Amino acid sequence: MARTARMKLTGEGTAYYHLMSRTNDRRFLFEKGRVKTELVAALRRAAAFSGIELKALVAMDNHFHVICKVVRGAGPVPADEILRRVATLKGSRAADRLAERWRALEKAGHYAERDAELNRWRARMNDISAMMKTFKEQFNIWFKREHGYCGSLWSGRFASTLIEDGRYLATCMRYVALNPVRARLVTQAKDYRWSWTAEPPPCPAGPVPADEGPVPAVALLKRVAQIGGGKVFGSREFVARWVVNLGACLRSRAAGPVPVGEWAYASHGWRLAKADA
């Protein structure tokens, strides 16, 4: 069966995503703190290289969650910015070698080859698929070298959900923050070392539809227990617009705005359970 297309912003604009990836056979490969520390560091390097802002992340024993912000502009990423990002990802020596190669191509008059290389690097910027590929390539090399591991580390492709800003983004960020609490690793989210923040953040700024009203932060913290399986999460209008954008890529799968309790709407396959349900 063909895979459902990944929902991504391809033109100019800003988008938020919830990303998750799990180990093969759900093995607890990241139980050691040193491994989770490297996983978080590799995620941060990959995001910095890709020009993507990490809003939230948490590394668990057999999976991780990321909520990120992607801003896509009209113009191409300048060459000097690419070199700066390469230095962040691979070190200054790698960036210097790349700069020297481009200067050599220019000196020889091979401008088309230089531009082709620049465009290949630019294609890796501001894209969640490219960011996750960069992260997994780097982390896989480190993990297999350190632990003598053979075979596939990850279970299939990563899951992604396009999220609307405002209360919907706040719901997902609190879900990520509470992962270690639900797993009974800590009693408070602020005590988990491999999370993006010591305290769950306040609701991000953004318009709240008048007919839905605000969601109390305390209720979100206590009751958001499980999010997953969908492709879009937000208001009815937001979900409907993106389902239409996906169009024929959905093939025979039914999709449309589906109520998720009193929280929001989502596309096909969504679920959200409450801790007190």
Image (cartoon, rainbow, N blue to C red):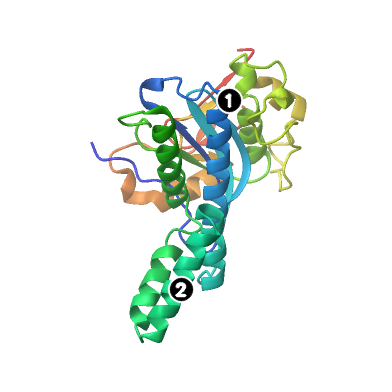
Q: Is residue 75 visible?
A: no
Amino acid type, label 1: Gly
Identify the residue at image location x=67%, y=37%.
170
Local packing at callout 2 (Cα closer than 10 Å; few below 14, some 14-19, many 20+) is few
The reply to whether callout 2 and callout 1 are in contact (CB within 8 Å) is no
Q: CA distance from mark 2 to mark 1?
A: 39 Å
Identify the residue at image location x=70%, y=15%.
187
Instruction: Tell me where residue 263 sits by quadrant.
Output: top right
Local packing at callout 1 (Cα closer than 10 Å; few below 14, some 14-19, many 20+) is some
Q: Which residue is mark 2?
A: 100
Q: Which residue is mark 1?
A: 33
Q: Is residue 104 above or below residue 130?
A: below
Q: Position of residue 121 (x, y in %)?
A: 43, 64
Task: Please tell me whether mark 2 or mark 1 is closer to you in this view.
Answer: 2
Q: Is residue 128 above or below residue 149?
A: below
Q: Position of residue 190 (x, y in %)?
A: 73, 26
Q: Is residue 179 left or right of residue 142?
A: right
Q: Earlier in the sequence, mark 2 or mark 1?
A: 1
User: Helix, strand, or loop for circle 2?
Assistant: helix
Q: Position of residue 155 (x, y in %)?
A: 36, 30
Identify the residue at image location x=28%, y=43%.
251
Q: Is residue 126 above or below residue 168?
A: below
Frontmost residue, 10 versus 249: 10
Frontmost residue, 192 versus 209: 192
Number of residue marks: 2
Identify the residue at image location x=62%, y=13%.
184
Q: Is residue 64 left or right of residue 175?
A: left
Q: Position of residue 237 (x, y in %)?
A: 55, 46
Instruction: Tell me where residue 108 sits by quadrant.
Output: bottom left
Q: Is residue 239 above or below residue 59?
A: below
Amino acid type, label 2: Glu
